[in-house]
Image (tube, rainbow, N blue to C red):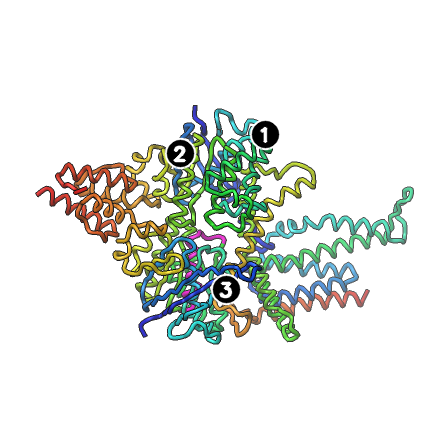
């Protein structure tokens, strides 16, 4: 059913990767991205891939899932490789009319493709192993210093939480409204672009009205439960970092050092 | 102190949305005075627009009276400084369970009020667990709200309130959107909280069978209290209740019909058992 | 000929996944034209799935549905035409209102049917009158109306399509007693005026008992019984085992019967109960003074 769809791509589990402090996971992911962009040798990328492969193994997420998640970026991969193959000057290996393929171009495109695959699989591991709500909490805590310069970090995190909470509710509601308008003979499937856009009005207006009504009721309910921003607020679930988090960070840094090392010797 | 809530001559009207200066003010509450005793189970009846939800929202300072005053546990509800003391003492549960659950996981939602109040995490854990056990939802503590039935969601909402350890819970038509099974679950939970935990309950409802279970019924019509007493005393007034768009339990209506036809049967029958017993009495008397 | 007929109607949710579930299982039923059928069953009994099949919103996993003798899935035109033949009012229908005026909202369905302006106008006004929406209110924004009025406008929106079969899912949910009685009265009036078939889904046996000519009980994806109200209320015990509430008055008369005072088997409304009880007492020599 429509309401069973998952938000983000969280893959519940209890592996060591799942249990890591989400703050560390975010930091490691950030560092991982940086190093991936620094790496300019095949060996460096391979080290990155090895790192991703190890993490996938530890997280016990089926490899199939990782590949499934990459489907959507196939066009991007093709585009990048085509661009690189045809437009990089160098030693020509194939020439037909105006099309020239160079050795450098081939190398570069293979390199870029590997880098993108590595980047996407690595970062998607973060969302696969961390529930959206924990992720929000972690981001809130990591960004906490920004509160000093009046960035409304807590408010943003609260908005994220409420959005996550209401997505399934609103999807279900959309489903209901669509059925109801169809029952009144609304034609949602046929016609040109304009006609279809117009056909959305009977769905969007009730949806907005309902979202506002819900927002109003939720606001009162939150007030009833003494909500007053993050002033003096405590949390049920404390994010705790322990030995395993530091070990994970250390191991990651070792991998990334190798990347730098490989960069230097090439 | 005996009274948890004291309302004294409360008048209220919403701010006019009209731009005309002299648009007539529509009073929603017209001098409501009401004392709620600690530990009482009070049902509030009235058709839509009778002012029953409006008065309820005064009890935890969501709305402030234009005239008159509300005293909650000795605190004047108009006192802004004490706002959170009042809301912690009087919790509110609303009709639509979907629109009062904030978090994506049951136990985090139950913790919401405690997080706002700055309760220590260890103590919070205990209070959340106890609240969930009180409403019988402990096994669902790690579920997402949208995986639950209406009755279960409403019990989670109740747990979110009782985690604050309030003296009083106001429930505004908590069963209106539920099916019979959900209604039973919620009513059982409410009664248990009242009998076992001693929580004062103010239940706003359209269901006469729910009201019949209360210690006391208050009937409102156009911003005023028109009846106040035990269920037996209130349901006697069949004509008046029908006049203001309300029902009486079927058995009360039957007894009322019998009396009208000259049959001698008490006018304060509200339960099936009483009704059965009285009818048998009449039949047996005739047999002699 | 039956207006609604199903043949081995089955619907499976999430087929082929671990969540596979039969929402309705092998339903065979014939509903005669002109009935006012109350459909009762607890949440998950399959009643909502069943009614969504009747106007072609859901496609059966197997089995057939005939409306007025035509298989509604025989071709695409028929399926679309079924939406106009069978009008469906969902739960809390006021949340689907979207037009600027009440008039336009009621006209939405008839307009989609491609009717002429005059016909639309005629139907909108007639239906508005039926549900007690005044001419003045027709020009208002629907969002200015009270909850009960909005509900009536939304129901009118489907009634104005003049479907051969009108289905209402929990039309009284969340209303106060007065609002509830008013909606039930309007449905009954519509049924009598139009002489069409009406299906009314409800959790509340009491509501159904007030107006239905037949009752359909569903449980566990199947039909338990389809019969006249007195016969169905005679099965009070089975029904209450399914998690449904039976009217208080029915319980009283059943208990009296158990204690040896057999007054009547088919009591489910107060006026009827009163009549039966008075007659019984009269027989026993208890005389009222009225």
Same chain for mark 1 and mark 3? The answer is no
**Residue segment shown in magenta:** B146-165
- Structural distance between the alpha carbons of marks 2 and 1: 29 Å
Q: Is residue B129 visible?
A: no
Regarding mark 2 in the picture, which secondary structure is present there?
A: strand
Check residue C36 in the rendering and tell me which mark sits there, or answer none.
2
Q: Nearer the viewer, mark 2 or mark 1?
A: 2
Give coordinates of residue C70: x percent, y percent.
Answer: 51, 25
Q: Are marks 2 and 3 in contact (CB under 8 Å)?
A: no
Give coordinates of residue A4: x percent, y percent.
Answer: 53, 49
Query: Relative to the observer, which residue lies in front, C146 or B128?
Result: C146
Q: Nearer the viewer, mark 1 or mark 3?
A: 3
Overall secondary structure of the magenta section: helix
**Residue linked to disc 1:** C76
Q: Taking A192 as reference, is B210 left or right?
A: left
Query: Relative to the observer, which residue lies in front, C132 or A113?
Result: C132
**Residue linked to disc 3:** A222
Give coordinates of residue C56: x percent, y percent.
Answer: 53, 34
């Amino acid at each position: 059913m429509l309401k069973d769809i998952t938000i983000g791509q969280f893959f519940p589990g209890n592996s060591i990767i799942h249990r890591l402090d989400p703050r560390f996971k975010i930091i490691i992911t950030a560092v991982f991205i940086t190093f991936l962009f620094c790496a300019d040798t095949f060996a460096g990328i391979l080290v990155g891939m090895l790192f991703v492969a190890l993490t996938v193994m530890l997280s016990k997420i089926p490899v199939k899932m990782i590949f499934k998640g990459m489907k959507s970026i196939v066009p991007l991969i093709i585009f990048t490789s085509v661009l690189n193959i045809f437009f990089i000057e160098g030693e020509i290996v194939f020439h037909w009319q105006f099309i020239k393929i160079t050795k450098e171009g081939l190398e570069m495109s293979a390199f870029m493709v590997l880098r993108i695959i590595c980047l996407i699989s690595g970062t998607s591991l973060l969302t696969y192993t961390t529930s959206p709500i924990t992720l929000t909490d972690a981001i809130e805590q990591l960004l906490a210093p920004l509160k000093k310069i009046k960035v409304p970090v807590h408010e943003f995190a609260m908005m994220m939480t409420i959005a996550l909470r209401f997505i399934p509710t609103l999807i279900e509601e959309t489903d209901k409204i669509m059925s109801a308008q169809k029952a009144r003979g609304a034609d949602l499937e046929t016609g040109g672009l304009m006609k279809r856009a117009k056909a959305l009005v009977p769905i969007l207006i009730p949806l907005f009205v309902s979202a506002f009504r819900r927002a109003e009721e939720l606001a009162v309910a939150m007030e009833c439960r003494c909500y007053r921003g993050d002033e003096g607020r405590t949390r049920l679930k404390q994010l705790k970092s322990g030995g395993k988090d530091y070990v994970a960070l250390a191991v990651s840094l070792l991998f990334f050092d190798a990347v730098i090392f490989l960069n230097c010797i090439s | 102190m005996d009274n948890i809530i004291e309302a004294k001559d409360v008048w209220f009207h919403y701010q006019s949305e009209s731009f005309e200066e002299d648009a007539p003010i529509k009073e929603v509450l017209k001098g409501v005075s009401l004392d709620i005793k600690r530990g009482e189970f009070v049902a509030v009846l009235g058709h839509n627009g009778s002012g029953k939800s409006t008065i309820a929202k005064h009890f935890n300072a969501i709305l402030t009276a234009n005239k008159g005053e509300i005293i909650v546990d000795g605190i004047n509800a108009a006192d802004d400084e004490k706002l959170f003391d009042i809301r912690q003492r009087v919790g509110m549960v609303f009709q639509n369970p979907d629109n009062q659950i904030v978090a994506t996981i049951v136990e985090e939602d139950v913790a919401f009020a405690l997080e706002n109040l700055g309760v220590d995490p260890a103590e919070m854990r205990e209070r959340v667990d106890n609240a969930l056990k009180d409403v019988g939802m402990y096994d669902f503590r790690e579920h997402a709200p949208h995986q639950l039935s209406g009755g279960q969601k409403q019990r989670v909402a109740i747990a979110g309130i009782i985690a604050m350890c309030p003296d009083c819970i106001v429930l505004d038509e908590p069963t209106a959107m539920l099916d019979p099974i959900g209604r039973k679950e919620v009513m059982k939970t409410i009664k248990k909280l009242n009998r076992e935990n001693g929580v004062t309950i103010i239940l706003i409802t359209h269901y006469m069978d729910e009201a019949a279970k209360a210690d006391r019924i208050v009937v409102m019509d156009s911003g005023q209290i028109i009846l106040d007493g035990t269920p037996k005393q209130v349901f006697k007034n069949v004509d008046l209740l029908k006049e203001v768009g309300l029902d009486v339990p079927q058995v009360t209506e039957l007894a009322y019909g019998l009396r009208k036809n000259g049959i001698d049967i008490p006018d304060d029958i509200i339960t099936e058992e009483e009704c059965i017993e009285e009818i048998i009495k009449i039949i047996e008397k005739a047999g002699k | 000929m039956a207006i609604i007929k199903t043949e081995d109607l089955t619907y499976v949710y999430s087929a082929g996944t671990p969540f596979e579930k039969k929402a309705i299982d092998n339903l065979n039923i014939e509903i005669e034209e002109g009935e006012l059928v109350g459909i009762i069953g607890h949440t998950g009994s399959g009643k909502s799935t069943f009614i969504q099949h009747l106007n072609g919103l859901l496609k059966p996993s197997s089995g057939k549905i005939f409306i007025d003798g035509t298989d509604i899935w025989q071709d695409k035109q028929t399926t679309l035409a079924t939406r106009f033949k069978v009008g469906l009012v969902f739960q809390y229908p006021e949340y689907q209102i979207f037009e600027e005026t009440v008039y336009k909202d009621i006209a939405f369905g008839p307009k989609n049917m491609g009717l002429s302006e005059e016909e639309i106008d005629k139907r909108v006004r007639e239906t508005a009158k039926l549900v007690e929406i005044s001419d003045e209110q027709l020009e208002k924004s629907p969002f200015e109306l009270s909850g009960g009025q909005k509900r009536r406008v939304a129901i009118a929106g489907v009634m104005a399509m003049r479907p051969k079969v009108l289905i209402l899912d929990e039309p009284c949910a969340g209303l106060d007693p007065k609002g509830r009685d008013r909606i039930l009265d309007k449905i009954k009036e519509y049924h009598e005026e139009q002489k069409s078939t009406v299906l009314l889904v409800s959790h509340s046996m009491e509501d159904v008992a007030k107006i239905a000519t037949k009752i359909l009980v569903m449980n566990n994806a199947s039909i338990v019984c389809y019969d006249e109200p007195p016969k169905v209320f005679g099965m009070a015990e089975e029904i209450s085992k399914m998690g449904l509430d039976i009217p208080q008055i029915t319980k009283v008369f059943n208990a009296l019967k158990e204690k040896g005072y057999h007054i009547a088997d088919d009591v489910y409304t107060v006026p009827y109960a009163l009549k039966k009880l008075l007659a019984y007492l009269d027989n026993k020599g208890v005389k009222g003074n009225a």
